[in-house]
Amino acid sequence: MGISDKHLVTPDVNASADKLQFVDPSPVARRLLWHLFSIGSRRVVQPDRHERFEKPGAHLFWVQSGAGELEYKSSRFALKRGKSVWLVDMSKPRTYLPAAGKHLNITGFRFGGPGLEFWHEEIKDEENAEFVLDDFRFVARTQSELLRLVRRRPTGWEWQVHMRITEMLGRLLMTRNLLDSPHAELPEPVIRVLNAISANPVRDWKAKELATVGKVSYSGLRAAFQKSGQGTIHEHIQRARLDQARLLLADKRLSIKDVSGQLSFSSEFYFSHFFRHHTGMTPTEFRHHLKG
């Protein structure tokens, strides 16, 4: 069993990690797949605080026994047994608080993967980290299957881990109705513009040249975007560049200067300013968080 990321766990008299198993993902899994960093249960008997960027990835967990609260960003969530799971971004500060005079046993897994930041944004777990699942047996079954794969490591086990985590995340999407298809079709100009940006996401698109792509006036394209619920044209351009920046930064073969150049920023400084403005962290901090 690989334990190379054990150094990320600070010994804490307030919480026991005796039943946690640590996993050292392969380089291929880190780049291409959902991968595990740790899996198992923890017993919390006193407030257990974790600082931002303390560990990489996300933590999906549920309560085995006891009760308490989760402090996550500016919100508090009641932790108790039931059909709920909680998903937290490990780059954010969080505190696990057992109820007065009681313990709190939580179990789950910490994982990472390409595009994890997009999931946090789409699911909006900062606003509501709790997900209620109708079939909670699926959660227990997934945990059991992941533990079996980690312990036995059959051929292709990391791909199977990827598939189990994908299924779990799909359940979370469905609880928020995020997989429902919109009833209204997008206007043709908007579709043409979205396709153009997707085909060349590293380009520094200008709104007026996109109007030409959409075969409408600039004001017509702006109105079509707003009416279709896609936000403003500028917001979509910035979001596409940010998404591409994250994907490029995940490739350790590229320097930050290389990423800046590929995204057509005039300098590394302006790229870093752009990235920090939209994510709250520098490109270097973002890469550090991905490393594990």
Image (spheres, helix red, strand yellow):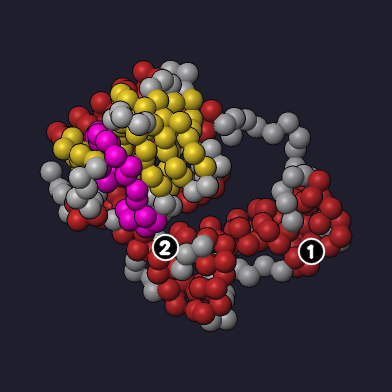
Is residue 92 or residue 178 the one in the foreground? 92
Q: In this view, does 108 lie above or below 28?
A: above
Residue of label 2: 286
Q: Please tell me whether mark 2 sits on a helix, a strand or a loop.
A: helix
Residue at the (47%, 64%) spot, across then down: 281
Identify the element where label 1 is drawn: helix
The answer to whether residue 210 is above or below residue 178 is below
Asked whether disc 1 touches disc 2, contact meaning CB atoms under 8 Å apart, the reply is no
Range of residues picked out in magenta: 31-60
* Three-letter amino acid code of the residue under disc 1: Thr
Q: Can residue 197 be seen in this view?
A: yes
Q: Quadrant of residue 99?
A: top left
Residue 114 visible to the viewer: no
Q: In which quarter of the image is residue 161?
A: top left
How far across and down, in percent of the image, does residue 75 sit? 52, 42
Residue at the image position 41 percent from the left and 20 percent from the top: 82
**Does 228 sit left or right of 257 as displayed?**
right
Q: Name the residue under label 1.
A: 212
Could you tell which of marks 1 and 2 lies nearer the N-terminus? 1
Q: Where is residue 120 in the image (x, y as percent from the top left)?
A: 49, 46
Dot 2, how many residues are within 10 Å of its Cα: few (below 14), some (14-19), or many (20+)? many
Check if residue 268 falls in the magenta segment: no
Q: Which amino acid does label 2 sit on?
A: Phe
Give the side of residue 278 with respect to residue 88, left or right. right
How far across and down, in percent of the image, does residue 54 sit? 33, 56
